[in-house]
Amino acid sequence: MKKLWVGAAALLLGGCSAIQVATFKSDDDSFKRKGEKLSIAVAGMPTSSTGPAGSSKDWLRIREPEGTRLRDVCGIPAETTSGTAAPTFLPGLAVLAAGILIDAGIAKLNEYADRKIKEFKHTYSARLSVGRFYLPRNNGSDRVTPRTRCILFQREVDVGTNSATPNVRAALTLVLQFQALGDRAYVLTPIYLDLAYAGARTSAEGNSVDLDIAVGIAVVKPGAGTTLVSELATQQNYSVRKVALRGNNAERPSYAAKFEPGTIIPAFDGVTAATVVVAVTETGDGSEEFGQLRKDSDAYGKVLKDLGIDQLKSLLGVK
């Protein structure tokens, strides 16, 4: 009944945008948030963890041969109802009721549109502290083996339809590699991205999300005297547009070429401790339809309400 109420209000008050919303269909592989779990790892140094605590070394769940390639570059060991006439003895009440109903319809429509708009955006992040983080100087030829090589990030969700039988799948997997840029700097480059299920809602027609990714790295450095301080070493931002959802399809396209290159990261004097944060925002296609509906209801709601009440007053013979 609530859906019928919102749908009727949308069609009456929202115009063309309401028709688009009423016929909107979500992609089946979007808006997957149940049982969400985030994992992050930093790989390359001898004491680096290849996955979160308690996980196996194959936590990235990347099929071969891509899995072997990534483990090699990152230094990871393998493993309608009809209306009725208003009573003639209650014309004033009928007019009042009409105004209340239209107000309620607008409020319900706005509430529905706002809730839906939020479903098209999903932000999540993970943080990891490591005791040994190293991007050495004089490594333009990449000959220094024991160094930090990759950041690995994964989002898992339960896509099962039966609560008694979970079906946990890797929804998003991202691998970023520290690549030497001469002898004094590095760039953090995305080398693998797999998006099977989106946390943001998408349309069945577009079936894609825009990804905005931020990576922050804070390292420990000497402060005044014998003190140590935490200092932001770098903040990297990446955006890639229209990433299609893979779902259960076997194909895993790489979107690495669509990323803009990262900014320069100065090389380090020695091994240090670090905290790494990865934050991801998914924005699903289709939200503009609900955004337009919200604007239409704000712009036309009062006009339509006044017009409807004036017409009703005329029909009922009241002022």
Image (cartoon, grey):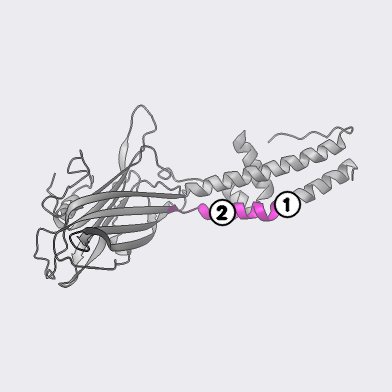
Mark 2 Cα shell of 10 Å, populated few (<14), some (14-19), many (≥20):
some
Query: Where is residue 201 drawn, in percent x and y?
Result: 45, 47
Q: Is residue 287 magenta?
A: yes
User: Is the N terminus in the top left, top right, bottom left or bottom right quadrant?
Assistant: top right
| Residue 133 drawn above or below residue 82 | below
The amino acid type found where label 1 is placed reads Lys
Residue at image x 61%, y 35%? 2
Residue at image x 12%, y 50%? 47
User: What are the residue bounds of the magenta stretch?
Assistant: 283-304
Q: Which residue is mark 1?
A: 302
Extreme top residue here?
164
The amino acid type found where label 2 is placed reads Gly
In-image side of 175 versus 57 (left or right): right
In-image side of 158 versus 288 (left or right): left
Q: Is tag 2's residue or tag 1's residue first in the polypeptide sequence?
A: 2
Query: Where is residue 142 drawn, in percent x and y?
Result: 12, 66
Q: Which residue is mark 2?
A: 291
Q: How far apart are labels 2 and 1 at the CA level?
A: 18 Å
Closer to the camera in the image, 180 or 311: 180
Q: Main secondary structure of the magenta part?
A: helix
Q: Are marks 2 and 1 in contact (CB under 8 Å)?
A: no
In-image side of 187 versus 75 (left or right): right
